[in-house]
Image (cartoon, grey):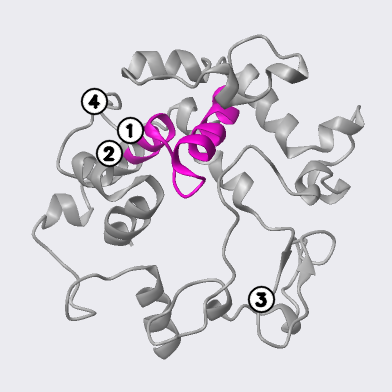
Amino acid sequence: MQCIVLHDFLPGLVGSELAATIRDGERRFYRPRGAPVLPVEFADAAFRYGDSQIRERYRLNPGMTPTGLFPGLVGFSRVPDAHVADWTQLFDLPGRSRAPQRSRRIDGRLVPSLVHLPEQITGDVEAEEHRSLAIRDLQRGVATGLPSGEAVAVAMGEDPLDAAEVGVRELGWTWETPLWFYVLKEAEVRCRGERLGAVGGRIVAEVLTAVIDLDETSYRACDPSWTPSLPADGSFGLGDLLAFAAAS
């Protein structure tokens, strides 16, 4: 799985060039001493990019009618037989020609189900807006003292988004951009929502690569020259893992 993260997941998420550069040793900002601790810029902002990729409805297997997240797919109980996942519906598996359901592009929008989370998820709330995942993510950023996206971009030596790119000035927002929202908008306007941008991508790639590199039991520490034996070309990805697990 560590190999999949470094050679399949990260190249798709941040771009092959940045993933390879960091994998080859260029960690410019995240260089923990001792055991790595996840920085708040990662945990409370950049790695929450997936919030915007969640679809409103999912089909988990060929016999299932596309079903909304809530209440249809709410968790906390045994998975009904009708909802058992057929991974060909969600991932590209080798030998399968039919395209799976794609996640949404990374952008500054969430589907309605995530803006109106059910009580099973949020519990009792003082104000109705606290059911919104966006509000909860923004509040978490304030609580942890996250810097703005523009401040992080400047610190990284990147060209920050301008007001037109962020796109909230017309709504009355005149301050710098919360880092979580900045990462989403950076991906949207500079990478067409297909992957993370320079700020979000470097935060995610540096942290995940470092966590693997600093694990004394990881393959990178024990045998850096190791490569997967399946498939024959060594390009073992998540789809290959799921196909292998299904055949085992």
Question: Residue 36's mark?
Answer: 1
Looking at the image, is mark 4 or mark 1 nearer the viewer?
4
Please state the horizontal and vertical placement of residue 40, each as a whole percent of the image: 49, 26
The span shown in magenta is 178-205
Give the residue at x 44% y 19%.
160
Q: Work out whether mark 4 precedes mark 3 in sequence or the reverse, and give the earlier one.
A: 4
Looking at the image, is mark 2 or mark 4 nearer the viewer?
4
Q: Is the residue marked by circle 2 packed among few (<14), some (14-19), or many (20+) residues within 10 Å?
A: some
Q: Pointer 3: what residue?
A: 60
Q: Relative to 118, does residue 95 appear above or below in the rendering?
A: below
Q: Is residue 50 magenta?
A: no
Which quadrant holds the C terminus?
A: bottom left
Residue type, label 2: Ala
Q: Work out whether mark 3 precedes mark 2 in sequence or the reverse, and give the earlier one.
A: 3
Q: Work out whether mark 2 precedes mark 4 in sequence or the reverse, and give the earlier one.
A: 4
**Alpha carbon separation for disc pair 3 and 2:** 34 Å
Q: Work out whether mark 4 precedes mark 1 in sequence or the reverse, and give the earlier one.
A: 4
> Relative to the observer, which residue lies in front, 151 or 226?
151
> Relative to the observer, which residue lies in front, 114 or 189?
189
Q: Is residue 204 magenta?
A: yes
Q: Pointer 4: what residue?
A: 28
